[in-house]
Image: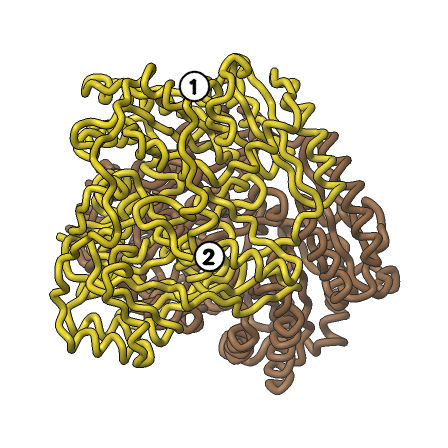
Chain colours: A brown, B yellow
Amino acid sequence: MDMLWNGWGDPAKAAPLPESVTGLLRDLLGVKPRTTPALRLDDIDLPATTAGPAAFKALAEAVGGDDDRVRTDNESRIRHTRGKSTPDLLRIRAGDFSDVPQAVVLPASHDEVLAVLRACSAHGLAVVPFGGGTSVVGGLAPRRTAFVALDLRRMNGLIDLDPVSRTAVLQPGLRAPEAEALLAEHGFTLGHFPQSFEWATIGGFAAARSSGQASAGYGRFDEMVLGLSLATPEGTIETGRAPRSAAGPDLRQLILGSEGAFGVITSVTVRVRPLPQARVYEGWRFASFEGGAAALRKLAQDGPRPTVLRLSDETETLIGLAQPDAIGGDLSQSAAGCLAITGYEGTAADTAQRREQAAAVLTACGGTLVGAEPGERWAQGRFSAPYLRDALLDVGAFAETLETAAFWSRIPDLYTAVRTALTDTLTEAGTPPLVMCHISHVYENGASLYFTVVSAQGEDPVAHWTPAKHAANEAVLAAGGTISHHHGVGTDHRDWYVREAGPLGISALRAVKRRLDPEGLLNPGVLLPTD
Amino acid sequence: MDMLWNGWGDPAKAAPLPESVTGLLRDLLGVKPRTTPALRLDDIDLPATTAGPAAFKALAEAVGGDDDRVRTDNESRIRHTRGKSTPDLLRIRAGDFSDVPQAVVLPASHDEVLAVLRACSAHGLAVVPFGGGTSVVGGLAPRRTAFVALDLRRMNGLIDLDPVSRTAVLQPGLRAPEAEALLAEHGFTLGHFPQSFEWATIGGFAAARSSGQASAGYGRFDEMVLGLSLATPEGTIETGRAPRSAAGPDLRQLILGSEGAFGVITSVTVRVRPLPQARVYEGWRFASFEGGAAALRKLAQDGPRPTVLRLSDETETLIGLAQPDAIGGDLSQSAAGCLAITGYEGTAADTAQRREQAAAVLTACGGTLVGAEPGERWAQGRFSAPYLRDALLDVGAFAETLETAAFWSRIPDLYTAVRTALTDTLTEAGTPPLVMCHISHVYENGASLYFTVVSAQGEDPVAHWTPAKHAANEAVLAAGGTISHHHGVGTDHRDWYVREAGPLGISALRAVKRRLDPEGLLNPGVLLPTD
């Protein structure tokens, strides 16, 4: 099944907002109903392709000669235009197809990927590796140039499973649910559950350094990766002979986060874990975000570590975004304070022990156990927030998310700085926003902050949002945060990423890119500047 | 205090071998007493320096103008000649000073390091960053060229401690015991205890991806590092705004393991942990190495994780190398089988809980608790093996170590392959060796193997050993291991490292080096080939 071309996910799962929410939007944020009719897929006229028949012939030969593996029809090209950020959706809904690929190419193997890169080099086409298409940072919109989308969906196998070492070799085009199903046949799980879980792919997780909702227990995706194969215009890199090594810099960590700019990831060796026997999620309430964060820090530093550990701030708790299925319920039911979700997955004994010991810590830190219901509601609604965004956009509201991370001591200032930047900028622009935040990834030494912004749309919604996003980026850097904890760099964060990494660091990465991709075919302008 | 110039450690701690051991060497390995008298420091004539007075003047200006900070005396130059591998010691004892530096330069700050790099560039001198001087892989012996040793001992401060984030900023020239003492004043520990602990430095740990004996609990050094500053001939790289980030490739992991070839590490931000309240070490016995390894794997994969977890094979157990202080005791006391050491450090409650639960796992895996004595003896003797090597060399024996790591399923074949390669090569050369092995670092997905070889010395001991070392390297690659788990690459492993990383991977790293060190001043020939 293909994802909705102008929104998120499975079209059958779309649901209109309850009247209580539309009332809230109208009364609190001044959202006015949209009046322009929605664009229909069949009505779209795409710019003609500029690549000639020789280029398409070479691409078809690279992927085995089958015409169906080089798709130039309107629908295929539209479905591979940009990713799923709010600006991406707004642009496509407004009929802006300036970032449409020339063609969609579907290789089936590492060697076919190498052949596609050769064909693109020969015909002056850029290449955008395409997994689930779920980038929210402009990772699929290269510098304006003729490019093909390299869709990895045919590379969707489990290549090897080593139950002794607990490792699996996965192909990059596997969507996360497919990977989980293949591993489950052998009794294993990857344990990677980002919000994009239902659509995103293994290769995309690696390329963008994804982190999932159970990262406290299973780790980030980059921590799960033990080996990678990379196809580049200059050949192949294979990494990962051991879990850890002192043999030079870690090349895996150079490929992870390279966002298709260094090469195409064609296989990923990951650690796997036994399927959990038990899963428990529950809710805790804290009087303040600061107090709740201190409790999360205590667990992250001294243990025991839950598998899932999240904390919503007061606003997010009040609105109920922690349980998207419950939004629009009776607000008076939401007691003041901040809701935390704790989850435990593992053997029955281990789960029970960690839960009991963590409960003692959380109680000592001032938390009150609310019970299983908020946890179960969070678990049920954990992948549904993007559907909610679509519904908000449909009724004329603006909704977007952004995220960062920092060391613990900087978290309070970072929280205030980003919130203030978003609130001030959008308020000055005449659309005072609702800004919500949660901590969803914790480490011994720091945590992530994930912000959700909802406001009325401006006249030109993308142009209206851009200054607020830039102000948030500036606030992140000024307060000592990283420009992204798990969404990545893409084109949206690139200029701030360049400042974060510094001129010499960026220059070193550009030297790597020039060596692996001397013609600059791969994702030009994504991650690294082109000039 | 300076380390022994032609051996390991504190000269006052040197001790002759007990007669029982010399008997063992004579009867089992055919070791014949050395007859050449030992070289005395005062008798050494060094090759004259080739750098002129202008170079030394420029270096002195770079470090503040004080003559004592640019040392050209014989003793300083000798003490900065090569590292502490057995071939290094054999060469220096034989009066081979072909790798002696022109001078020893002692900068006190990041800016002075940058100034030294500029002075070296102006005068055509290469630069070898020098921490504790404990490399055992030729990391301090660059391609033959005029070079200065950049000794970081004056950069030995604790720059910042953040008790909330549990991070510390350390200067690179801090020796590990100095770092531990500074952190202990604030109630924290780094928890990094490699065998080189008493002499090695923070910068060296980072540059060479060190791993300590408590890695099961505290992690490898590269896992402790949260940020790095790097001084290069082209300027500065600063990394680490958050524990984890999705902002591009992880530049920290490009600097870690760069062995001075990309730049000089001038500060290291590390995670720290509260000083343990309790420490318990004990011994377990397994019938076989295979059975013991399965038990270690069970703990590494399913927990609970001890802080220290090691297993000696049958030969190492028999000889008693796990407890160096006990070597030469009554061999009949050593029951057959394999000795494992488990250690637990942390709060009293956590230590007790992990110990109890791990004991149940080890017992279920066929282990027998031997009690606290072997654990305590291991802990007391944990840093003394290099002294033992000196004593062996003194009596005419040869002793060296090497190590690797792989995924669990490859460990049995890797063990056999390396053992066989060493045994066959040295036996064919007329000096049948004793080959011992232990597992000292475990991961969910694999483990390290650490080999110790003892034999009679050949006529030319370095030339005699070289084919055996090369055969071991070939066996490591063929059996799917990494060429080093924690010693690093240096010059000794470089040619095998190049094959492990592959031509394109190496080429990407050389592109980084060219960008940061275009004149090739830094550790030429270490880590990466020069041509």
Q: Mark 2 Cα within 10 Å, few/some/many (few <14, many 20+)?
A: many
Position of residue B189 relative to residue A287, above or below, is: above
Please count the marks in the image.
2
Residue A317 vs residue B303, the one in the foreground:
B303
Q: Residue at x 47, y 44 (%)?
A: B194
Q: Mark 1 Cα within 10 Å, few/some/many (few <14, many 20+)?
A: some
Secondary structure type for disc 2: loop
Q: Residue at x 33, y 69 (%)?
A: B106
Q: Residue at x 71, y 47 (%)?
A: B277
Name the amino acid type tagged 2. Arg
Contact? badges 2 and 1 (CB < 8 Å): no
x and y, in percent, of residue A115 in the image? 21, 43
Residue A219 vs residue A143, the one in the foreground:
A219
B241 left or right, relative to B491: right
Residue A131 seen: no
In the picture, the quarter occupied by the C terminus of chain A is bottom left
Picture quadrant of residue B185: bottom right
The subunit letter for the residue under badge 1 reads B
Q: Which residue is mark 1?
A: B315
Which comes sooner in the sequence, label 2 or label 1?
A: 2
x and y, in percent, of residue A275 in the image? 61, 30
Residue furthest to the bottom in view is A428
Q: Which residue is mark 2?
A: B175
